[in-house]
Amino acid sequence: MKLLLDTHMLLWAAAGTLPAKAEAMVLDGDNTMYFSPISIWEIGIKKSLGRNDFRVDAEVLRRGLMDNHYQEIPVTSQHALALIDLPPIHRDPFDRMLLAQAKFEGISLLTSDSFLRQYPGPIIFIPKE
C-alpha cells in the first residue's frame, strides 16, 4: 500500500509516538511511505511562529525521512488543480493540499485529523491514542 503521512503523523513518526495501528502500517515492509514538501513547509512556518507543537528542525526531519526510505512527492500544478475540486470541509491549506496530492497520486493519506476524515477518497483515519 502507498501511504502519504500528514504532518502530525510525520512528527509522531520522528518522535516515536505514532498510534500503534499507524506504527504497524509504517513498519510494514510491503507499504511504501511518502511525505510532501507541504509538510516540511508547514513545520517551518509554524516553528517560526513559535508553535510549541512544531519544535522539530524541518531540515533534520527531511533528512531522517530520506534516510528511512520515505519517498518525496513533488508539488505540481496538477495538485493545485485537484485542490480546487475539494469541498470546503476543512480550512487548513496544508491539509487540503496533502489531500489533493494523495487523491491525484492515488495514495492513501494517513491522518488523525477528524476534519480530513470527512472527505471522500483515499483517507486512512487513525486517532491519536
Image: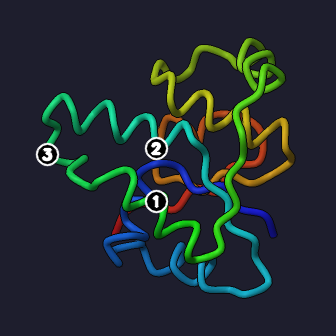
Question: Which quadrant: the N terminus?
Answer: bottom right
Report which quarter residue 14 is drawn in. bottom left
Q: Which mark is residue 40?
A: 2
Is residue 113 toward the left or the right of residue 2 in the image?
left
Q: Are marks 3 and 2 in contact (CB under 8 Å)?
A: no
Residue found at x 70% / y 61%? 71
Residue 5: horizontal and vertical position, in percent? Answer: 58, 56
Residue found at x 42% / y 73%? 19
Q: Secondary structure at mark 3?
A: loop
Identity, as a three-letter code, of the amino acid under mark 1: Leu
Identity, as a three-letter code, of the amino acid under mark 2: Ile
Q: Secondary structure at mark 2?
A: helix
Is residue 89 toward the left or the right of residue 103 in the image?
left
Q: Which residue is mark 3?
A: 52
Query: Please, is residue 65 above or below residue 115 in the view?
Result: below
Lower position in the chain sequence, tag 3 or tag 1: 1
